[in-house]
Image (cartoon, coloured by chain):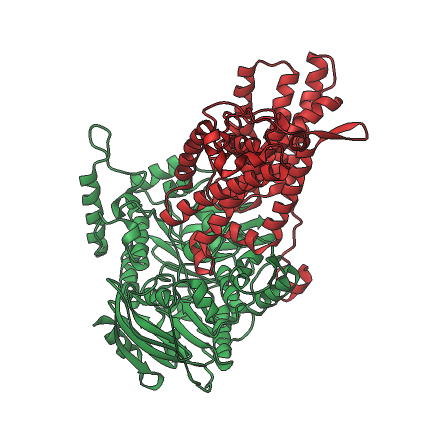
Amino acid sequence: MSANELGSTSTTGLKKVRRLPAEVSILGVLIGIAIVFEILGWYVVGESFLANKQRLSIIVLQVAVIGIIAVGVTQVIITGGVDLSSGSMVGLIAMVAASFAQTAINSRAVFLQPEWSQFGFSWFIDSSPLWAIAAGLLLGLLLGFVNGFIIAKSGIPPFIATLGMMVSVRGLAKWYTEGQPVALLSQDFAWLGQSFEVWGFPVPRTVIIFFIVAIICHVALSYTRYGKFTYAIGANPLAARVSGIDIGKHLIKVYAVAGMLSGLAGVMLAARAQSGQPNMGVAFELDAIAATVIGGTSLAGGVGRITGTVIGTIILGVVTSGFTFLKVGAYYQEIVKGMIIVTAVIIDVQRQKRKSRA
Amino acid sequence: MTPVVSPTTMKAVRESGAVPGSEFLLEVEDVRKEFPGVVALDNVRLTLKRGTVHALMGENGAGKSTLMKILAGIYTPDSGTFKLRGQVIRLKSPLDALENGIAMIHQELNLMGPMTVAENIWIRREPKNRFGLIDHGKMRHMTEELFRRLDIDIDPEIKIGKLSVASRQMVEIAKAVSFNSDVLIMDEPTSALTDKEVTHLFKIIRSLKSEGKGIIYITHKMNELFEIADEVSVFRDGHYIATKAAGEVTRDDIIRMMVGREITQMFPKETVPIGDVVLSVKGLTLKGVFHDISFDLRAGEILGLAGLVGSGRSNVAETIFGVTPASSGTIHINGKEVTIASPAVAMRHGMAFLTEDRKETGCFLLLDIQDNAQMAVLQNRYAKFGFVQQNKLTKDAAAMSNKLRVRTPDMHEPIINLSGGNQQKVLIARWLLTEPKILILDEPTRGIDVGAKAEIHRLISQLAGQGVAVIMISSEMPEVLGMSDRIMVLHEGRMTGILDRKDADQVKIMELASH
């Protein structure tokens, strides 16, 4: 479609302006940060930051888990809401998935205690990893559905609803095995979290999953009805309702998807760590939200893209890894990380302001 | 190079009462303003004499609001000179403008819902007591004084959110007047007002004139112009065309200057065969809002819905469309009883609804024109397995947008960059894309210029000719009388009468609307 089709309305010589996609500025920030670390690397430690396969592989792995969560959180934030329960869900679902992927009877999962064996759960020991994956995804979907349902029907702010979920689910994760980790997982399950070689470069399978998820969600947001309605609800819920959108039903879908993706992240984490621990995923929701916001999604809703979130996640990963590389103390790391998040968002907000009316 | 005078100096001059010898209160020359992709103002000029009302006319997108926003300090011009009382000034912010003595009443109301009338008027200027805290009693007193002076009857303690759109507009007007500025800019101040309130506003304007103030008055309504303005300037496509004394120019002259060609008919009402009853409403009631509304609507018919602001017309429309389901009563569509539980259900029955307030419930301001235009039709069409058939949809939306003459270089332009009237056209396009059988329009031509108004009226008549049944809520008497086959009048939530086209006139409608 071109300006030619609208030619008859243009009597003023209104010119069509090519706009650069929003991601360009965020990509610029990413490249800038990487270059800064590279230079600092030579200066401080005497070696290259980027030209190290192992380090890149680790960055990419950290990025993948947060990224899977962030992709779901992005959709939630676009509707004008937020999901604080992602991290806790990761913890619970890592535990649950791990418990379905065990190899020894010597386990602590509640449902595998002798009193419960009447339900036949012991059948899952040494079983196909598909059960663990399915259990994880379904549980995530269910918890996300509950989030969405509460928000849609009661009208309480998403912040509060997901905050409650965050606290309760973390409690569930600890209750599940009375605080004990679940270990000795099957090799088939662990395979999911491992890497394979591509031209001498180790690629974690988690990353492949991340990219597939990101592509699917990007396509959904950009090309489907579901995506258009998501943006509409965030931009103007009243107008969305008048246009025929069933806001309650849609929000339930969005939160359910976010929950399922948190579940997927939990499964991947358990596979990679070959265990499930009740404190897994702590503060992951904050990283996911930070990545989303750095990527150009507005907390007010109506604006945001998956491509931006992916770049935002990578920025976060590069920064964390960069600091470790430069042997910066952990405390300094957190202080500066917070400042970087704020700076990246300020840059993006300035760009938005310049784009619309000045 | 004349030195720029600072706002503090300006303030001192005004307070001293000294009147610098200058015929013109405001002189604006060679103003240019560009936005990404659009030249909004191309070397325009404007002058304002003391104690006069200067009307500014032009089609949507002609640049009127843009120039006013520059004068009010909201935008900065790319170039231009501004002289206030003969002194050159530079306006860098809305605060600057206010301190220099320029106040503006915007087309889109800028009030804060959860705060009271008094709080809204005096914000940033609240009277403080000796502890430095806000003196609410004094603030209420000041508001009452102001309202007494302007003969306005609104409770200062009521929250803005609870007021009707017309009352909110009166509060905006009072707020602007309270700045005691020399220049008052009014951007379509009567769009939400009924005739009674318009007369009231004109009284206020005349008293301001006698105090020596200058008023720039943007409107699309010709009759208002001839009633209140002393001079009129016309803009077209960002260019200044001419300034004439109001007594020396005719309606057609102005239209010709605005549009560049003749427009002969304002309301092209064609006689259209009226078909069967498509919508039948009986005893429709929404507790506490409206009561016992009953009427039949036929294919090809245009039913005007008249009444004072606050009479419940929009509420009735919202209930029929499912936004707020009724407490009791029945709705039949094509003879079958239906329960309209939500807008989606209404749409499935072939209904469409253009809301009254495009900013609040119409436009997705963060999205572009394409997204705004397609949002309703996507509910039931143009999607395969959930995937949007974007190519087809873009083509059809562009065609509709062309048909309505929406002024834009690009369908991906953020809708917030369009003028109010063009935004309205996009919303009309949104609903027309759904090919409705029953079309409910709530103030469809509010904030739309003469040329576009005629186009939209022609379009509505065309749709009626194709068998669409139309309900048109309008506070503009000429529009209601010119377009409707029958006119239903509401008063405080009740039907006071249904007039046939041939029996209806302004007096009868006002009578029914007031009792």
**How many marks do you count on the picture?**
0
Q: Position of residue A43 (x, y in %)?
A: 71, 13
Residue B73 appears in which quarter of the rendering?
Answer: top left
Q: Is residue B113 visible?
A: yes
Q: What residue is drawn where x is 53% and y is 15%?
A: A331
The hue in which chain B appears in the rendered picture of the protein? green
Q: Can residue B353 be seen in this view?
A: no
Residue A172 position in % (x across, y down): 44, 31
Residue A4 appears at what percent x and percent y? Answer: 68, 62
A81 or B93: nearer the eye? Answer: A81
Q: In this rendering, is residue A132 above or below A14?
A: above
Position of A280 relative to B151 (above/below)? above
Q: Which quadrant of the rendered structure holds the C terminus of chain B?
A: bottom left
- Indicate left or right for B442 with B430 as reference: left
Chain in red in the render: A
| Residue beneath the point at 40% across and 80% down | B335
Q: Which residue is at the front of the view, A315 or A340?
A: A315
The correct choice, above or below, for B281 with respect to B310 in the image is below
Front-most of B168 and B499? Answer: B499
Q: Quadrant of residue B511?
A: bottom left
Extreme residue toward the right, this view: A199
Task: Residue B476 in the image: state x and y as whole percent.
Answer: 36, 70
